[in-house]
Amino acid sequence: SGRIVLAGTPIGNLEDAPPRLRRALEEADIVAAEDTRRLHQLVSALGLTLSGKPVAYHEHNEASRAAELVDHAAEGADVVIVSDAGMPTISDPGFRVVEEAALRGVDVSVIPGPSAALVALAGSGLPTDRFTFEGFLPRKPGERRERLAELRDERRTMVFYEAPHRIDATLEALVEGFGAGRRAVLARELTKLYEEFRRGTLGDLLAGVQEVPPRGEIVLVVAGGEAPAAANPEELVAEVQQVVDSGL
Ligand code: SAM
């Protein structure tokens, strides 16, 4: 029977295309791509030929396309889903298709590939034991401030995606939200020729982008906040005593 196959694609370096991706693209009955032009570029750069039918799906038609794609899989087709780069569903379309397939009991399989978030986090040198993926911050200043206020007490490392023309404004908002001294890493052009990790504080990174505006694709990795200072032991004893005295 058919299935939905979510396939990760390289985020810049074609050598990151695994054999499973190549085979899945060549053998798929249908390849659903965010942008079919980009799909054709990828397929030809990898030296492959599609035997299946390319179809476009994106943010705006995802809900209606999801049902159609799952119908095809339910009827026996192998439907491969790719996005422009990296893992589908991660700040990219694909989620609706998986949701629909799961609801209808259609098999879903994932061919793992790179995702800029994990590549940046792993190379950041900031704690990786716990982290939160925040994707793109809202563009409207009010909503962005609100989101950052929600993250004020976040202790886990935070991963943000951003476009180069908004990096300046975003770093300013992060400085305002978390303070200039918070450790952070700007990871740029990952897996590509000009891959770069700029490490420092949010204040350093802001000064850096104001001096040399970064080009290309960017992930910001921001350290979580420090734990609040431990309560004073005498106060703790007094609190426990109060509970004991109250007879609870
Ligand atoms: N699905 C993709 C993934 O798994 O990484 C993310 C898609 S999202 C629309 C695009 C954003 O991912 C960019 O704005 C940038 O923040 C980040 N990104 C993608 N490729 C990158 C790269 N090679 N270097 C740095 N950031 C990258």
Image (spheres, grey):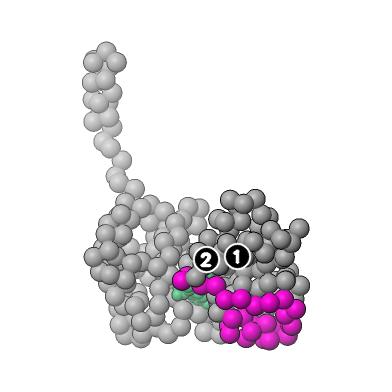
Query: How many angstroms separate mark 1 from mark 2 (CA)?
Result: 7 Å
Up the image or down, 40 lies above or below 109; here it is: below
Residue at which label 1 appears: 68
Q: Is residue 39 left or right of residue 58?
A: right
Q: How crowded is mark 1: few (under 14 residues within 10 Å), some or many (20 or more)?
A: some
Q: Which numbered tag is attached to residue 64?
A: 2
Residue 50 colored in magenta in the image = yes
Up the image or down, 65 lies above or below 127; here it is: below
Q: Is residue 47 visible?
A: yes
Q: Which numbered tag is attached to residue 47?
A: none
Instruction: State the residue at coordinates (30%, 60%).
Output: 148
Q: Nearer the viewer, residue 183 or 117?
A: 117
Question: Element under label 2?
Answer: helix
Q: Which of 13 and 2 is in front in this view?
A: 2
Q: Where is residue 228 in the image (x, y as percent from the top left)?
A: 30, 46
Ligand 1 under 8 Å from disc 2 Cβ? no
Magenta segment boundaries in residue numbering: 36-60
**Which amino acid type corresponds to the residue marked 2 in the rendered image?**
Ser
Instruction: State the residue at coordinates (50%, 64%).
Output: 63
Q: Quadrant location of the N terminus?
A: bottom right
Q: Nearer the viewer, residue 239 or 175?
A: 175
- CB under 8 Å between callouts 1 and 2? yes
Question: Element under label 1?
Answer: helix
Q: Position of residue 74 (x, y in %)?
A: 69, 58
Instruction: State the residue at coordinates (38%, 52%).
Output: 155
Which image quadrant is residue 115 in? bottom right
Q: Is residue 155 left or right of residue 195?
A: left
Up the image or down, 223 lies above or below 172; here it is: above
